[in-house]
Image (cartoon, rainbow, N blue to C red):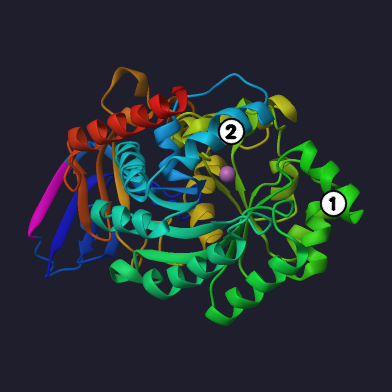
Amino acid sequence: MSKVLIRAMVLPMTGADMFYPQGEIAIENDRILAVGERGSAPSGFVPDRTLDLPNDLVMPGLINTHTHAAMTLLRSYADDLPLMPWLKEKVWPFEDKLTEEDIYWGTALALCEMIRSGTTTMLDMYVAMDQVAEAVLKAGTRAVLSRGLIGNGPNGESAFQEGCDLVRRYHGAGKGRINVMFGPHAPYTCSGEYLQKVKAEADRLGVGIHIHVAETQDEINILREQYGKTPVQWLDELGLFGGHVVAAHCVHLTQEDMEILARRHVCVAHNAESNMKLNSGTAPITELRAKGVVIGLGTDGASSNNNLDLFGEMRSAAFQQKLQVDSTVLPAYEVLEMATVGGAQTLGLEDVGMLAPGFKADLITIDMDQPHFYPRFSIPAHLVYVAHAGDVRTVMVDGKFLMEERKLLTMDVSEVCKEAETRAKRIAEELKG
Ligand code: NI
């Protein structure tokens, strides 16, 4: 039995006017027992540990709904190029050289960065996902993992088998910290038949689907030529949208596409910074939200961002919509919702994303006693327009501290950085030769 009491400002994300300037949160084992003003903990609750952090703000851990974690090894390796040369001449040849161990260390690097920037859960899509799962188990974070499937590639069939194995081995692992989905890459890299096979298996195993949809204008053109439809209409016709689906990007959508996504309860992972950096376009987030589509925020891989900082992503997502639509859209609290509650809904996780009794104790504290947080007119505005990764002081997942006073407790950061540096440079050298 472990009991922890944290006394701090509390932003529970249970409603726009819910805020406890002198609050407390009581945690028993992996779950939240009570949240509220001082004295909310039930009588008889005797904590093993009390954290008095009157100048910190406690909020739910942030949720990254679309990433390729091990791509940290490609961080700032290739930038400022048009999309296709970037992929064909730089990213894919580098990825071809990655060993399973490289993927472990690339993911470990991503997880160190995520913990230090307040991200407690990610939805990942990559290869060698057993390595990713092991890194997550070591780091202590929460994750939903999907084996990326290029149906049209030479490994389409073996990748599908690996996707099935991943579900068997890791769905529910780490006392439920890991969940698994299928990860068919995109409608232009998988045939209709392949997508239907994946969908049937996902339904049989009771897991969801994570797929890139309508990311670029090129994709729209390819699908129109091949099938005479938009990606969303094509996937709907294939029956892919019947269950839990996370559609990453959704930049280029028609009105009909948006209605299909809403009607089919497809969740959207919005990647504002990646979409800007790769010149993909601006996703119609304001319209999607108005239609009731659930939206989470994602960073995408570190080669198209180039960090995994969701504080930066919140700010970019807000500013991009304001530039595109008008300055009143996506107020700060709604952006915070996308990074927490919306992220949890997007991933199909029912007991994270908010600080409420019975929810998992996945939380972060932010050091608000810094010049850039004064005066304190609006906490949500501070978190979205002001805060950055380095302001996170404490991270807890499943009731366990992963970081205190900015020191990581589950990972040896210097070892991870050294391994990542050595491995990435080795591949770059091989490619030069
Ligand atoms: Ni992606």
Mark 2 and mark 1: Cα distance apart in space = 22 Å
Q: Residue at x 40, y 34 (%)?
A: 73
Q: Nearer the viewer, residue 149 or 18?
A: 149
Left or right, 44 with reference to 376: left
Quadrant the N terminus occupies: bottom left
Asked whether the viewer can see residue 67, the reply is yes
Looking at the picture, which amino acid does disc 1 mark?
A: Thr
Does label 2 point to a residue whose CB lies under 8 Å from ligand 1? Answer: yes
Q: Residue at x 28, y 58 (%)?
A: 137
Ligand 1 found in image quarter: top right
Q: Nearer the viewer, residue 390 or 387?
A: 390
Secondary structure under the numbered disc 2 in the rendered image: helix
Question: Main SS of the magenta segment?
Answer: strand
Looking at the picture, which amino acid does disc 2 mark?
A: Ser
Residue matched to label 1: 230
- 57 lies above or below 84: below
Q: Residue at x 39, y 32 (%)?
A: 427
Give the x, y percent position of residue 302: 47, 34
> Mark 2 Cα within 10 Å, few/some/many (few <14, many 20+)?
many
Left or right, 236 with reference to 273: right
Q: Nearer the viewer, residue 42 or 123?
A: 123
Q: Residue 274 bears which disc, if any?
A: 2
Image quadrant where residue 376 sits: top left
Give the x, y percent position of residue 398: 27, 61
Residue range highlighted in magenta: 48-52
Asked whether the viewer can see residue 379, the reply is no
Give the x, y percent position of residue 365: 28, 41
